[in-house]
Amino acid sequence: MAAWFIKRSSDLLQRPLEMSKPLWNKGEDVDQLMLAFTIGEDRTVDQAIVFWDCLASWAHATMLTEIGFLTIEELSNLTKVLAQIAEEFSHPVKPEIQEEDGHTYLEDRLVREVGEAGKKIHTGRSRNDQVAVALRLWLMADLTNQMLLVGQLSQKLLDFGERAAKISLPGYTHLRKAMPSNWAQWAVATSSALAEESQAGQGVYTRLDRCPLGGAAGFGVPLSLDRELVARLLGFSLVQLSPTDVQNSRGRMELAYLSQLDSIGLVLERWLNDIWLYTSEEFGYLSLSQEFTTGSSIMPQKRNPDAVELARACCREIRGLRASVSYLATGLSGSYHRDFQRLKAPTIRAGGILAETLKVCLALIDNMTVNESRCQQAMSDDLYATQAAVDLVRGGMAFRDAYGVIAQQLKEGTFARPESQAETHLGGPGNEGIAECRRDLAKLNEYWEQMAFRSACTLYRMKSAGSETE
């Protein structure tokens, strides 16, 4: 059976691929096994970046027209088709790519529908910087979308915390009861962490915000390209100065993006772990709606938090994909290597996983309820030991002495729970800082909305350019 499977797999790999001639092929025979291996997942993965390749191709064609390598009419024809293809690839169900990758698909389609101008558009660029700019645009747009979702989740957590602010909750260290807390403090912890990630994301976005187009294979081209014009048309703030570093930055840019996603995942993972723990029968502080749990195929009584567990697993999966990219990008000499092709799939996959996880987390908040009575039962006297020591300090006793007095009372069983006092310092129970979080969050969300608008403007410019020439 194993021998048959191996032979069958080999036969499939040896079959001629139904595709046009690769752009790099000059008429020589090509080993089909080698071709299938080098194409890899590109036909599927590149569906995510053809849209951005269209925008970059339009900007490149506009620049070629400005420097005299395309006519106005050729630009007009190219722009119309590029806008049409971009529209097709902006839908969830995208056209199948039969060529070796998205870039070959795009060029073949332009040649079929526009003719000679489709052959001219590759003047002054390589597939290497073509994929670099398409990926860079995708990374910036996807990071923006992720941060908008992060902002929504952060906001929703604050709403949850505000609703449940008066319900106490044991605070834990080492998973042992430590000090009194409440649900507002619990929610603000994750909300403010997500806001911190949103702020950190601005630095990642700034790092990505350099236009690589014009770097070609890593050494520029013998033409007077207007790289600044291309950068402006695509909405970049800067040009990536060194053509060689355009290629050297492959891997670094993906890692910067993935590190940000990984850090967001770490925030979510700890929050999800709390929910997983607190919805267990032993704790019972939270309950999930029946609609947001699954059942057992053998145990009739079971309701399981599968969505919580899978979301938690997704956070770890993102960490694994980041590690994969890190390994793929290391150990290489300068400039371009085909190894970079393998960076695309884990990077794009991680983006999809995090977006899906964030959406599930948003829905999760609407499907969990605080069990106030169980929380109150859990507020045992020992949680207030630190407060009792501080009360002695207020009376003039040194803290270390007060600590010893309370420790002795606990040991002897004479400790009496003091009257609960709300903390007045910022961040403590009773002054959790929800208003401050909302203020900071509003500024961060405004930044990401501006970045989303900037990305949309690039598409608008291309579509406008196409309609103006009709």
Image (cartoon, rainbow, N blue to C red):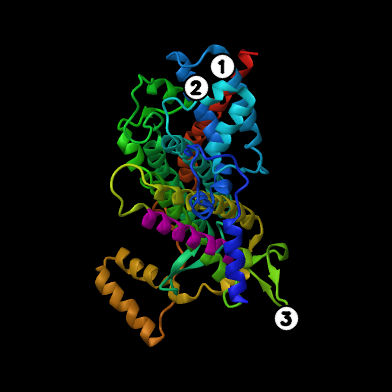
User: Is mark 1 in CB contact (under 8 Å) with mark 2?
Assistant: yes
Number of residues whose C-alpha sits closer than 10 Å to that of mark 2, classed few (under 14), some (14–19) or many (20 or more): many
Mark 3 or mark 2, which is nearer to you? 2
Residue drawn at (35%, 67%), measured in percent from left and top?
391
The span from disc 3 to disc 2 (Cα, nearest Å) is 62 Å
Horizontal and vertical percent position of residue 358 = 56, 52
Report the front residue among 357 and 189: 357
User: Is mark 3 in CB contact (under 8 Å) with mark 2?
Assistant: no
The span from disc 1 to disc 3 (Cα, nearest Å) is 67 Å
The three-letter amino acid code for the residue at tag 2 is Ala
Q: Main secondary structure of the magenta part?
A: helix
The answer to whether residue 402 is left or right of residue 416 is: left
Horizontal and vertical percent position of residue 432 = 46, 53
The three-letter amino acid code for the residue at tag 3 is Ile
Residue to which mark 3 is pinned: 298
Residue to which mark 1 is pinned: 74
Q: Could you tell me which secondary element the residue under label 1 belongs to?
A: helix
Q: Is residue 77 above or below residue 387?
A: above
Residue 354 part of the magenta segment: no
| Span shown in magenta | 309-328
Residue to which mark 2 is pinned: 61
